[in-house]
Image (tube, grey):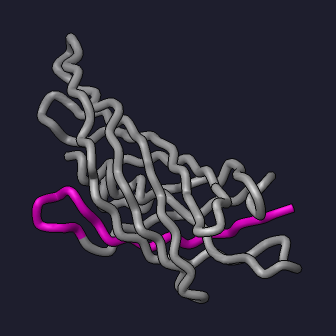
Amino acid sequence: MMNAAAHALTVLLCCCAISANAATEQLSETGYDVTIRPGDKITLANGSVVMTNAQSHESIVNDKTGEQSSEWCNFDSLLDEKGALVQYVGYCTRIHDNGDLMWSSFTGTTAEAPSPFTIIGGTGRFSGAAGSGITTTTSTRGDGLGTTFKNVGTLTVK
């Protein structure tokens, strides 16, 4: 159940190396996600469950350049009374070796369905960045706490 949310996060997320003269770049990257905090369980009156304050860590590799970055994602999930994932939402902070940050948000409904992400800014070369794309899970670890995923989309920098 948390794997689906962690996957999305992995969502989530997004990014690539940018050439100095490009304003918009196609994103293509592979990510490796591990849920490091499954979150707090809050049971609602109708039997649904909110898992809040979950956290995952991703290692991201740009498919074109090989550039690597580290990403921390925080998310909440809504599960129905039977424990099936209904919806998840979260945000990620990507950290590049030079100290530049990039922030993104994501939402989704299942680990199997592609989930959208939105780039919402950053620092350094990602100051004022915008973009969006889709995250797709390509494999899930046996314990459900890790995934391999693919991000594709676009990134526009000022």
Q: Residue 47 in the image: x percent, y percent?
A: 16, 20
Residue most extreme to the front: 98
Nearer the observer, 115 or 14? 14
Q: Is residue 77 left or right of residue 46?
A: right
Indicate the quadrant containing the C terminus: top left, top right, bottom left or bottom right.
Answer: bottom right
From which residue to which does the magenta span run? 140-158
Q: Main secondary structure of the magenta part?
A: strand
Task: Report the number of discs.
Answer: 0
Nearer the observer, 124 or 88? 124
Q: Look at the picture and state if 47 lies above or below 71.
A: above
Q: Look at the picture and state if 60 lies above or below 8.
A: below
What is the quadrant of residue 46 in the picture? top left
Q: Residue 138 in the image: x percent, y percent?
A: 32, 74
Q: Is residue 147 left or right of residue 74?
A: left
Residue 141 in the magenta stretch? The answer is yes
Q: Is residue 139 left or right of residue 28?
A: left
Residue 78 in the magenta stretch? The answer is no
Tell me what residue is drawn at x 42 percent, y 71 percent: 31
Tell me what residue is drawn at x 41 percent, y 59 percent: 10
Q: Residue 102 in the image: x percent, y percent?
A: 64, 56
Nearer the observer, 98 or 4? 98
